Image (cartoon, rainbow, N blue to C red):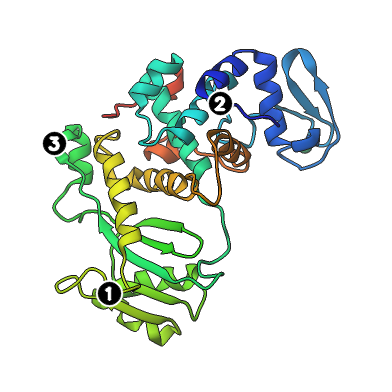
Amino acid sequence: MEAPETLQKAIAMFSDPQKAFETAVEFRWPGGNVTCPRCGQAKHSFIKSRKLWFCYVCKKQFTVKVGTVMEDSPIGLDKWMCAIWMLANCKNGISSYELAKNIGVRQNSAWFMLQRIRLAMKNQSILRLGQEGGPIEADEAFIGGKPKNMHAKKRRMYHSPHIPKPAVFGMLDRETREVRAKVFGDVKRETLMKEILEQVVPGSKIYTDAYKAYETLPKHGYIHEAVNHLDEYVRGEVHTQGLENFWSLLKRSLSGTYVAVEPFHLNRYVDEQVFRYNNRATKDNKLTDADRFALVMSQVAGKRLTYAELTGKDCDAVSSPEAGTGQEEPF
Ligand SMILES: [Zn+2]
């Protein structure tokens, strides 16, 4: 499947409904091996005029959007795929206002689309870091939301004095240049050790700062070296400068493009930035804009994000943002 190399080409390509449909189908079911998203079987007939399939097993219809992050969305594939192209390739991300203006949808619809595309960007690797010998940098960062930018109601919800700033814990495999990062409610020893044990091959070398939580790493079979940031930031190979670079990219996108991200949503913005970092072009991989678009398209299936999950509100109590009402989001 030929993916568009520029935004201009993406717009031209997807403005043709047939072409947009064929592209989405090819990314979803490579080689035309269409299977029912409900039962996984290939016993169906295609209703060409309506661009949908009828499954003989389930006795139900399905479209190319069913079972993907685009499910239930009345927004057309042309707009969805342009939005995916943009988020995959804009260096600092794209706000819902910009997206809304660019593709001609309401701002809250654009916000909902972006959150779902971030889910498709989420890292799916099940391999642990350190497969190729590492070393691994590990570090934690605190992301300060600015309460003054938030809606008063949200401010009360998320910024009570008892809720600390959200912490993001990250790891960088210096050999493969892959970053993993996640939001945690705390940075206690047990929390960080559990995550490291899940994500890093035992026996790997791990570099951290002098934070006490990391002191038990050798007990878990890791080789641990730390720099005490009071005296030094770098001691030969031992440093966390690679992650520092990632934190500054994350913080820049959060303070620039995304003005007021609530702790509840922070993980998705972290996923977006991790995608951008892990799939940026380097002298070794030569990844292009077309490759990044294709990668997100290949990950849209098998994931769903409902309005209720996204907002913590009951879907019945409010109408869908795409129906035109509801949601008050500051961004
Ligand atoms: Zn079926």
- Judged left or right of residue 90, residue 211 is left
Q: Which residue is mark 2?
A: 81
Residue nearer the viewer, 11 or 106: 11
Residue hosting label 1: 235
The amino acid type of the residue labelled 3 equals Lys
Q: CA distance from mark 2 to mark 3?
A: 34 Å
Q: Residue furthest bottom?
A: 219
**Pointer 2: residues within 10 angstroms few (<14), some, or many (20+)?**
many
Q: Nearer the viewer, residue 322 or 207?
A: 207
Q: CA distance from mark 1 to mark 3?
A: 40 Å
Q: Nearer the viewer, mark 1 or mark 2?
A: 1
Residue 157, compared with residue 208, is above or below; it is: above
- 32 or 109, which is in the foreground? 32
**Given the image, on which type of amino acid does mark 1 rest?**
Arg
Judging by the rendered image, the residue that carries numbered circle 3 is: 148
Local secondary structure at mark 1: loop
Q: Residues within 10 Å of mark 3 (few under 14, many from 20)?
A: few
Q: Nearer the viewer, residue 199 or 315?
A: 199
Q: Residue at 35% across / 69% down in the picture? A: 191
Q: Position of residue 328 (x, y in %)?
A: 29, 26
* Picture quarter with ligand 1: top right
The residue under label 2 is which amino acid type?
A: Met
**Chain-order first, disc 1 or disc 3:** 3
Relative side of 29 to 113, left or right: right
